[in-house]
Amino acid sequence: MIKLRSKRFGKSSSSSSSKLGGGGGSAAAVDGGGGGGDIKWELRPGGMLVQKRENGSTEEEMITVRVFTGSRWHDISIEATSTFGELKLILSLVTGLEPREQRLLYRGKERENGDYLHMEGVKDMDKVLLFEDPAYKERKLLGLSRNQAIAQLCRTIRV
């Protein structure tokens, strides 16, 4: 969290209170909430510096994403400001597929690991499709067959 001090909008307090109707409460609202004039700032994942919300939600908003794996639905609770890569990590624990083996599709498009859920528009109870990457699956099968061929060759050489 970043703390910055706010500056008054007018040069003197009398000119700003006369413009606002002379009420002490209105001048406090211009001042940044009264009590010293400190405004709390936060840096959003997109890089934007914004004033921190004071509505009591100091924690990140949790959403539930419904992930369909082809045969099963998984309800995953995750922070809205998480990335698709972090979602893949959680899914690897649930499905047994490594994150590099997974392809996530949201609204018909494959999403990259660095894409943020909230920036792509993922809301609570939205659906995401999980597919096993066919290229990785093929490389894995070729690797197994190559290892089997090497093992067979080693057995023939020993005999």
Image (tube, rainbow, N blue to C red):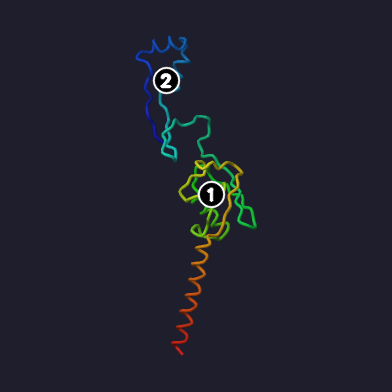
Label disc, if present, on residue 99 of the rendered structure: none
Label disc, if present, on residue 109 of the rendered structure: 1
Looking at the image, residue 16 lies above or below residue 135? above
Secondary-structure class at tag 2: helix
Which is closer to the viewer, label 2 or label 1?
Answer: 1
Name the image quarter holding residue 37: top left
Label disc, if present, on residue 31 of the rendered structure: 2
Looking at the image, residue 106 lies above or below residue 98? above
Q: For label 1, count other residues whose C-alpha is less than 10 Å away and answer few (under 14), some (14-19) or many (20+).
A: few
Secondary-structure class at tag 1: strand
Mark closest to the chain's N terminus, 2 or 1: 2
Q: Quadrant of the N terminus?
A: top left
- Please provide percent x and percent y for residue 89: 51, 54
Residue positioned 47% across, 46% down in the render: 115
- Please provide percent x and percent y for residue 14: 39, 10
Q: Furthest-front residue in view?
A: 108
